[in-house]
Image (cartoon, rainbow, N blue to C red):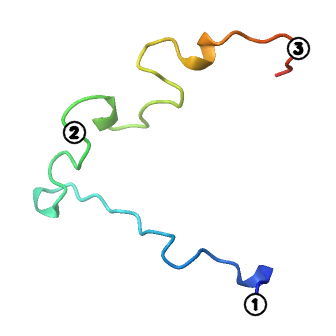
Amino acid sequence: RFRLDNLGPQPGSRKRQKRKGRGIAAGQGNSCGFGMRGQKSRSGPGVRPGFEGGQMPLYRRIPKLRGIAG
């Protein structure tokens, strides 16, 4: 029966998160599928949303429209 106390994800819809092994023998060796160089392969939080590599981002290219609050 469909009630609030027995809601849950459909079977097979939730995948286990892939654990990245850092060693050579782990199958995802040395670079762990991130490639050799570049910002996305470095440690840390990575690229902020909307960043386009130094190009003027879309939200700054589009003019601010009059009459729209926010």
User: In the rendered view of the protein, which quadrant contains the C terminus?
Assistant: top right
- In screen coordinates, is 15 left or right of 62? left
Residue at left 65%, top 13%? 62
Residue 25 versus residue 38 in the image, above or below: below
Q: Residue furthest left?
A: 25
Where is residue 2 drawn, in percent x and y?
76, 84
Residue at left 27%, top 28%? 38
Q: Alpha carbon of mark 1 to alpha carbon of mark 2: how far?
A: 48 Å
**Label placed on residue 68:** none
Q: Name the residue under label 3.
A: 67
Instruction: Name the secondary structure under disc 2.
Output: loop
- In screen coordinates, is 66 left or right of 33? right
Dividing the picture into quadrants, the one containing residue 34 is top left
Which of the marked residues, 3 or 1, is nearer the chain's N terminus? 1
Residue 1 versus residue 48 in the image, above or below: below
Q: Alpha carbon of mark 3 to alpha carbon of mark 1: how far?
A: 49 Å
Q: Name the residue under label 2.
A: 35
Of residues 63 and 53, which is closer to you in this image? 63
Of residues 8 and 36, which is closer to you in this image? 8
- In screen coordinates, is 46 left or right of 11? left
- At label 2, the amino acid type is Gly
Q: Tag count in the figure?
A: 3
Q: Residue furthest bottom?
A: 1
Q: Name the residue under label 1.
A: 1
Instruction: Name the secondary structure under disc 3.
Output: loop
- At label 3, the amino acid type is Gly
Residue at left 16%, top 61%? 27
